[in-house]
Image: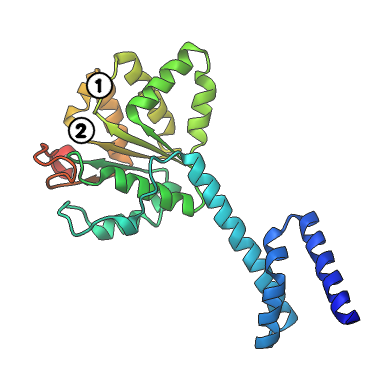
Amino acid sequence: MSGEVDRDAMEAVVRAHCRTLKIPTLAREFVEVERRAIHEEWSPVAYLHALLDAEITTRGEHAVERRLRAARLPARKTLAQFDWRRPHGLSKHKVEELARCAWVEAARNVVLLGPVGTGKTHLAIALAIEAIRHGHNALFFRASDLVRTLTEARDTRQLGRLHERLQRCGVLVLDELGFVPFEKAGGELLFDVLSTRHERRATILTSNLSFGEWSRVFGDDKLTAALLDRLAQHADVLVTRGPGARLAGTTEPKSAEEVG
């Protein structure tokens, strides 16, 4: 009986120490891991390794969850959920290569072009989630929303602070570029963001327009040409095909060779 009391007291002390050291997973798991260690005849080092591994794994999962919430994704759509059976003209091998996130480390860009409803936003979100799982932080904006946010920040003299936040972001997702044309000033603000990120941070852009039509969005041929010149140097361009899942009959942009 006294052994059980001593055992309970010892467990309480261990849990208290874990709270002090802020290692909650270890406090929660050490009894169960101990049972496994005894049953499988682990060495003390193996037992300690299992405990620390559980703590590190849980912390990693919590860190990923924090980055996912901070990214403000409109949905959590993964590559595993992408419907590869539907005609889309994409290379699965290329998308899986991008999912390994070497492009993020290299501060490259991914541009997804295609008709409405062909999976561009899904893939943009999925690639952002993969980047988050690889330890990068991300931010999602619809292009029109970001331009509005930039304009408001400029008018309230908060533009510098917003720029700093955007430049700290490892992966910036700009969705639906081309759905809403910008005023010239808005286009210039967005151009400044993308230019500052050039060769420093990674960006994902989706658009239903071919590159040749982007001047309609930015309202300035020279500014658009300068932006496309930067993108052409450091971008993987994926062109989706086929009738959209939401809207059939949308005009497709040109091929990657034609838009590049």
Residue marked by disc 2: 211
Tell me, yes or no, whether the two marked residues, 2 and 1, touch with CB atoms within 8 Å. no
Q: Position of residue 238 (x, y in %)?
A: 24, 46
Residue nearest the viewer, comparing 99 with 116: 116
Q: Is residue 28 left or right of residue 179?
A: right
3D distance between C-alphas at marks 2 and 1: 14 Å
Kind of element beneath mark 2: helix
Residue 158: percent from the left, percent from the top?
A: 53, 18
Q: How is the image coloured?
A: rainbow
178 w.r.t. 70: above or below: above
As shown in the figure, which amino acid type bears the numbered disc 2? Answer: Phe
Nearer to us of marks 2 and 1 is 1
Q: Total marks drawn?
A: 2
* Label 1 crowd (10 A; few <14 / some 14-19 / many >=20): some
* 160 sits left or right of 31 in the view: left
At 34% across and 53% down in the image, what residue appears? 98
Q: Which quarter of the rendered picture does the C terminus lie within? A: top left
Residue farthest along the right direction in this orientation: 2
Identity, as a three-letter code, of the amino acid under mark 1: Pro
Residue on which the image places disc 1? 181
Secondary element at image label 1:
loop
Q: Position of residue 237 (x, y in %)?
A: 25, 44
51 sits left or right of 142 in the view: right
Mark seen at residue 104: none
Of mark 2 and mark 1, the one earlier in the sequence is 1
Query: Residue, x 12% and y 37% (percent of image)?
Result: 250
Residue occupying the point 32% across, 20% down = 187
Quadrant where the N terminus lies?
bottom right
Q: Residue furthest front?
A: 1
Residue at position x 33%, y 59% from top? Answer: 80
